[in-house]
Each structure stands twice: as structure tokens, then as C-alpha cells.
Image (cartoon, helix red, strand yellow):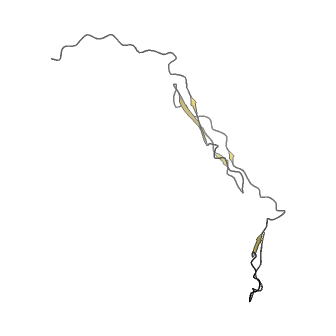
């Protein structure tokens, strides 16, 4: 609520002037609170397909905001993400370590000179 006033008679010839505020504001009393809605996240989607079949890959899932905040409702936290990524198929592609092995040398070719 606000209220205002004006100077009805200005000070004249050294009279004391009116220096106080011309307007006042105070909170309203006994008003019903407005309905509001807080931000709400949807459920996470299922994780997608892994980027690798073995040796370590990644997969992701997403979610969206289903309710935007209204009339002063709480916002969705910025720290809450709209996507998540996790490691997948982290097993090595070969169960056993296999050392390389050279084949037998072939016979010598003819001289180039």
C-alpha cells in the first residue's frame, strides 16, 4: 500500500520548511497468497546405446523440465543437469593378453644392382 501527501502551505520568509517524505509504503495485511508452482523435472529417459562394444565407451540419458516455475515458485537448480553420461562396456576387448609374434623371414630377394 502507498499513500502520499503534498505541502499545503509552503514555508515563507524563514519559516520551517517541509522536508519529510511525500510518500509512504507499507506491506498489505491479510491478503491471500497467490498460487504458485515450483519447477519440476521429468523422469530420466533410459540410457542410450553405448558408444563402444568393449574397451570402454559412454552412454547418455536426458530429462526435461515438465513444469516451469510460476508466480515466484522455486526454479530448477542449475546444478541439476538435463543430461547424464556414464561409462559402459568397460571390459577389455580381449579377455587374455596376446603378445605379437613375428612370422619366419622369407628368403632373400635378388640384388637390386
User: Residue at 39% of width from left, 13% of height from top?
Assistant: 101
User: Residue at 56% of width from left, 33% of height from top?
Assistant: 59
Tell me: residue 14, above or below residue 103: below
User: Residue at 67% of width from left, 43% of height from top?
Assistant: 42
Q: At which x and y percent is residue 78?
A: 63, 47
**Quarter of the image holding residue 29?**
bottom right
Residue at the front extreme of this rendering: 14
- For the N terminus, which image quadrant? bottom right
Q: Say whether residue 89 is left or right of residue 68.
A: left
Tell me: residue 16, above or below residue 46: below
Report the label total.
0
**Quarter of the image holding residue 105?**
top left
Q: At which x and y percent is residue 102?
A: 36, 13
Residue at the right extreme of this rendering: 30
Q: Say whether residue 48 is left or right of residue 99.
A: right
Tell me: residue 51, above or below residue 80: above
Q: At which x and y percent is residue 12?
A: 74, 88
Q: At which x and y percent is residue 69?
A: 69, 52
User: Residue at 52% of width from left, 31% of height from top?
Assistant: 51
Q: Nearer the viewer, residue 112 or 54?
A: 112
Residue at the bottom extreme of this rendering: 13
Q: Nearer the viewer, residue 35 or 77?
A: 77
- For the C terminus, which image quadrant? top left
Q: Say whether residue 63 is left or right of residue 38.
A: left
Amino acid at each position: 500500500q502507498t499513500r502520499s501527501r503534498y505541502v499545503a502551505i509552503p514555508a515563507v520568509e524563514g519559516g520551517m520548511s517541509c522536508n519529510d517524505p511525500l510518500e509512504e509504503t507499507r506491506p498489505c495485511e491479510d491478503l491471500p497468497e497467490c498460487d504458485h508452482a515450483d519447477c519440476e523435472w521429468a523422469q530420466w529417459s533410459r540410457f542410450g546405446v553405448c558408444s563402444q562394444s568393449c574397451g570402454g565407451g559412454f552412454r547418455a540419458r536426458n530429462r526435461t523440465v515438465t513444469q516451469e516455475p510460476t508466480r515466484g515458485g522455486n526454479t530448477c537448480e542449475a546444478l541439476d543437469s538435463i543430461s547424464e553420461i556414464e561409462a559402459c562396456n568397460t571390459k577389455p576387448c580381449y579377455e587374455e593378453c596376446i603378445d605379437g609374434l613375428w612370422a619366419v623371414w622369407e628368403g632373400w630377394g635378388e640384388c637390386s644392382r
